Amino acid sequence: MKLGAITNGISQDFEKALKVMVRDGIEYAELQFVWDKEICHHTEEENEKMKMLLDRYKIKTACIMKHVLNGLPVMETEIKSDAYQEQIRLLKKSIDLARYFGTDITRIQPFGKQNVVFGSGGAEKYLSGNNESWKKFLNLLEPCCQIAEDEGINMMMETGTGAYIHTVSLAKKAIDELGCRRLKILWDPANCLYSGENPVAAYEMAADDIIDVHIKDIRINRPLASITYCPLGYGEMAQFTEKISEMLKAHHYEGVVTFENQVIPPGKTQMEGWDMSVEMFRKIFG
């Protein structure tokens, strides 16, 4: 399988991150934060320098990882609003950068999380706003889907811990109802696990729609709404990681599997967190 990394999970120093990737046999970079700036907010000169360094170290770009639509409240957002139109501008910018860096994939992380989207038996009245947000969500996503279709770009929704789409179940439902062939899934099974979704069942549900996979390990304390990032094999994802690799291989998955390092050991650096897990990542998914 193709192995990737989010470069800022190693270092904000882009060249340093690329050198570590070469050392560890990781060939695909996801561009999210570089030199303490989020992608889509760099100057032309900075983008040129990024591309030059990628070429120098022979690292391919997997996708553009701008947080498009992230955090916007569904029920308070309107298509004509300045906030929404700014996100459309950034989506178009991310598509331009995808082409510039040689990929056909960009990410969106649509809207702020709503804990109860669908209610019944009275819950629709007290918890889910009469189930109105889903229709509004689809309406807000339609212009983005049209842009992706027109531009011929794959636009993946990340299953984000704090996003409206926080499970594969919701992502698959959105894809089926919108009917957009360019709308895909960035599957982060650890994020979905926090929402109670079994990774094996999730993959079997939507394997054909998943075009990127993020791998990390976490410890969860749901009563305290707490997550602790930990090295691979030391958290609640440990029981699923090898099975995920087996499923991807059996399905002839052609996308990138990305090690999303977010571990920062006490008193140490994020790069040292990377070093604690990269060998296991390569062993399982290589």
Image (spheres, rainbow, N blue to C red):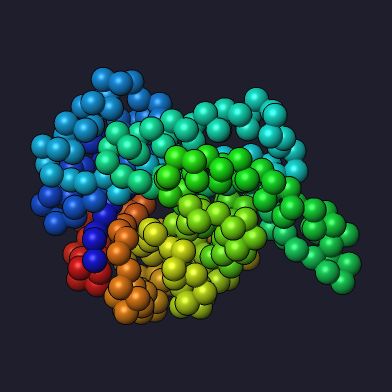
Instruction: Where is residue 186? Give x, y as percent.
Output: 44, 57
At horizontal 48% and vertical 52% (from top left) the residue drawn is 182
Residue 77 appears in which quarter of the rendering?
top right
Closer-to-camera residue (97/122): 97
Direction from residue 280 to residue 74 in the image, left or right: right
Residue 64 appears in which quarter of the rendering?
top left
275 is higher (above) or lower (below) than 102: below
Instruction: Where is residue 278? Give x, y as percent.
Output: 22, 60
At horizontal 21% and vertical 46% (from top left) the residue drawn is 60
At horizontal 24% and vertical 61% (from top left) the residue drawn is 2
State the quadrant of the C terminus.
bottom left
Q: Is residue 259 visible in the rendered structure shown here?
A: no
Q: Residue furthest front?
A: 150
Instruction: Count the marks.
Output: 0
Direction from residue 72 to residue 276 in the image, left or right: left
Direction from residue 160 to residue 230 in the image, left or right: left
Instruction: Where is residue 270? Give x, y as percent.
Output: 29, 47
Closer-to-camera residue (237/221): 237
Closer-to-camera residue (261/152): 152
State the quadrant of the N terminus.
bottom left
Residue 35 appears in which quarter of the rendering?
top left
Instruction: Where is residue 254? Give x, y as percent.
Output: 30, 64
At horizontal 42% and vertical 45% (from top left) the residue drawn is 153
Q: Is residue 145 visible in the rendered structure shown here?
A: yes
